[in-house]
Amino acid sequence: MSNVKILAPAVPNMPWQDRPDNLNGAPVWRFRDNPVIGRNPLKGVARIFNSAVMPCEGEFIGVFRGEQTNGIPYIYLGRSRDAIHWEFEEEKIPFTDEEGNPFMPVYAYDPRLVKIEDTYYLIWCQDFYGASIGMARTTDFKVFTRMENPFIPFNRNAVLFPRKINGNYVMLSRPSDSGHTPFGDIFLSESPDLVYWGRHRHVMGKSPEWWESLKIGGGAAPIETTEGWLLFYHGVGGTCNGYVYSIGGAILDIDNPSVVKYRCENFLLTPEDWYEERGFVPNVTFPCATIHDSVTGRIAIYYGAADTYVGLAFTTVQEIVEYIKAHSVVREADTEVGKR
Ligand code: BMA
């Protein structure tokens, strides 16, 4: 296969460890010192997981799901020189509304962080008469302006594409129910202004593969590559002991991303290390972000582990695209434009 390239800025100081010799599944390998964030990471917060990080001015910045000691999740800001050792702000992110008044969501979880042009967008799950999507923008990580809620309830797992496509902003999301949602497909919505959302399309659904036979949901912001949008998402299977969350991979059409070009029938990473199997919710690996370097093709995947820790895993764009293509099974619901 010809060389696959990431179409994004270079990040020469991204975290990295070379592939171990004994890998025999998908070409995704864990950071040897995982988890990168352990329990009780800051005062009043028992666990940090399902969090999103990205490069910022030569260092790294992130928005972190912090489970407070009252059990309610909220979003905290963190900074790091190496994207491994993090320092967190002790106070929750202080959102304001468009008029500058303080805005404090009832709860906020599973944040994603995406830069489009010169603005950073936070997207998370919050109460809007039921679980739905919240969104805010910032340019300086000091003022966070809460924006209109993009969708009505119930919805979770929303993430923006890192650039406009055909002139519109594009968001992936996963409509759900008010509970722990035993179903769910990934949909796409477009907006000219980040206020009005429409042209909804079905992207992909659960599959007959058992690891993702219950539901799926968007994960990290899609990575633009010469083969299409590389998407790391989560797939959920059901067992007699509850849900198991694994990481899956797909490649979406670059101009029409509701069309799936390739979809890997195997999980790319599934709970198997102690911090993934044991915690507040066992057997969860939940990707929310990547850091990727267009010069080397290296990709670091940040994922929540067991609703307790943050884990880090590595791959390269060449290896992962080859693996997804070699194990691709796309069905009619994947390859249609997603409009009925
Ligand atoms: C989902 C979300 C995630 C969580 C997962 C496993 O429904 O709430 O935040 O990681 O369940 O508990």
Image (cartoon, rainbow, N blue to C red):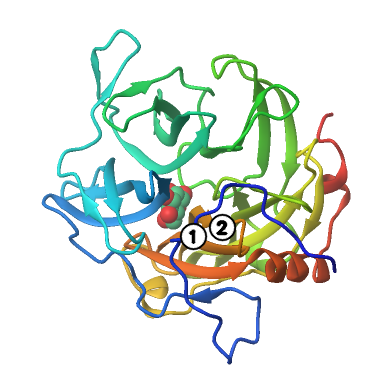
Quarter of the image containing the N terminus? bottom right
Q: Position of residue 282 (x, y in %)?
A: 40, 68
Q: Nearer the viewer, mark 1 or mark 2?
A: 1
Q: Position of residue 288 (x, y in %)?
A: 48, 51
Left or right: 6, with 49 as reference point = right
* Cα–Cα span, label 1 and label 2: 7 Å
Left or right: 202, with 45 as reference point = right
In front here: 208 or 77?
77
Label 2 environment density (alpha carbons within 10 Å; few <14, some 14–19, many ≥20): many
Q: Amino acid at mark 1?
A: Pro
SS state under label 1: loop
| For residue 195, above or below residue 126 | above
Q: Amino acid at mark 2?
A: Asp
For the point 75% across and 61% down, the residue is 4
Left or right: 225, with 269 as reference point = right
Judge whether residue 265 can be spotted in this image. no
Tell me the quarter of the picture where residue 331 sits: bottom right
**What's the mark number on residue 293?**
2
In front here: 147 or 315?
315
**What's the mark number on residue 12?**
1
For the point 25% across and 50% down, the residue is 67
